[in-house]
Amino acid sequence: MSPFISWSLFVLHTLLAVVTAGHALLYKRDPRSAFGWIAICMMFPLAGPILYLLFGINRVRTRAKKYNLNSPFRITRPKTKQLAPQTGKQHLDRFHKLFKSSDAVSDCPIVPGNKLTILKNGEEAYPEMLKAILQAEETIYFTTYIFNPTGIGEEFIDAFATAQKRGVDVRIIIDGFGECYSKKKAARELQKRGINAVRFLPPRLFPPTIHINLRKHSKILTADSRVAFTGGMNIEDHHLVTAEKNKNPVQDMHFKLEGPVIRQMEQEFSEDWRFITGEKLTIDSTPISEQGDAYCRVVIDGPNENLDNLETVLISALSSATDHIFIMTPYFLPSREIIGALQGAALRGVKTLVILPEKNNLPMVHWATRNMLWTLLGRGVRILYQPPPFAHTKLLTIDNQFSLIGSANWDTRSLRLNFELVVEVFDGLTAQELSAHFKSILSQSRETSLLELDSRSQFVRFRDAFCWLFSPYL
């Protein structure tokens, strides 16, 4: 190689290294991540800067801003500041700081007068959802991640078509990537029936927009502002746990909501609809009458301006616990900040339990989780494994007073990559029912320990640690 070419490559590497290392210094949140990338950019000629350009820049957030913040279809929600309601109820007053922290990150105020009904598995959830669709007279708004148009999915399509024929305004959003889980494409099947169904950021080859992140993982169904549903359940036969033909049953939980919080769910749907189609929906501003005693608030989380909303709420909730914390999730790869909050709760005497599935549908996630459990077990957090069938349930309940329900898991994909919707619920009755569910599962579950983790073979330790390296992407 001639001296001129060598000198040119050296100059090129120096320029690229300075630019990429400077970018890492300015934009990386974690000093360890910043230091690592700076070292790679400086030490590996040309390859280091190229690796950073390909894998080091957070294009998830950049692309989310492109689709949301800079979109001509974006709606700016009015920021309504509302502190804890002055109810005089002791169980609400003690959560005053949590009210304030949620106010800081959510565009939605706490609203009283809501009623929640817990629905276990598809056997309880699907009939209630179909009933709401068939009884609707004005509007049906529906968002889901996975919609298999066969089996129970076909029943939903028939119900949507029947509602539309009688004059109901039916609007459906299906995630463009989640739709690919089934052979038949749900949006296409719905459109064949004349139903107004659209895809959220579908992957395409022309123009190329292939991206597995930025997924609309939230679940919403509203009917006439009268009833709404949310939770972790998709539309597929797997959730019909007792069905004889179901070879891969999936346990899950959904929630029926009645009351003023429905308006917040409708508003979120309208923003998504406007972003996808450019059409602005008119959401009725008439106050919805109170139906129960629960105080609720919708919290939106996503890799845009809502980044870290959910993590902030979770840390505040964990920090407010005085008696117990019950967590149930299929995917558990929390951030260091959440791990610290769980450790702190256990160390101050709060009974802290995490229930995970014994057999996960994503083995790599299960293995990666095992590599980090020692950080919790060593501080007194109890980890238990729920026996099959696979549990897809996502729940948090604290002190028999506060609960968090919705679509989010306790992993990077939900906390940083997906668009999620959760509902804060301040209601003793709901929390007590969920605590009773936890305790029933607890009696069937197997507790793990540090001794069990330490007894893993070297091969298993290596496998678990290797999978853990990819935990930000699992």
Image: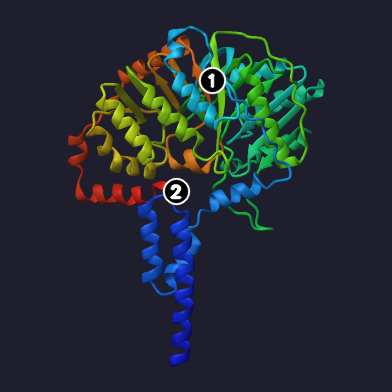
Q: Is residue 391 visible?
A: no
Label 2 sits on what residue type?
A: Tyr
| Image spot of residue 156 (x, y percent) | 66, 26
**What element does badge 2 sit on?**
helix
Residue 99, numbered circle:
none
**What element does badge 1 sit on?**
loop
**CA–CA distance in space, label 1 to label 2:** 36 Å
Relative to 446, does residue 11 appear above or below in the rendering? Answer: below
Q: Which residue is mark 1?
A: 83
Residue nearest the viewer, comparing 382 with 123: 382
Q: Quadrant of residue 336?
A: top left
In the figure, is residue 74 to the left or right of 236? Answer: right
Display colour scheme: rainbow
Q: Quadrant of residue 184?
A: top right
| Image spot of residue 267 (x, y percent) | 68, 28
> What residue lies at 74% left-to-right and 20% top-to-bottom?
285
Q: Is residue 107 visible?
A: yes
Residue nearest the viewer, comparing 177 with 389: 177
Relative to 138, does residue 197 appear above or below in the rendering? Answer: below
Label 1 sits on what residue type?
A: Leu
Q: Which residue is mark 2?
A: 473
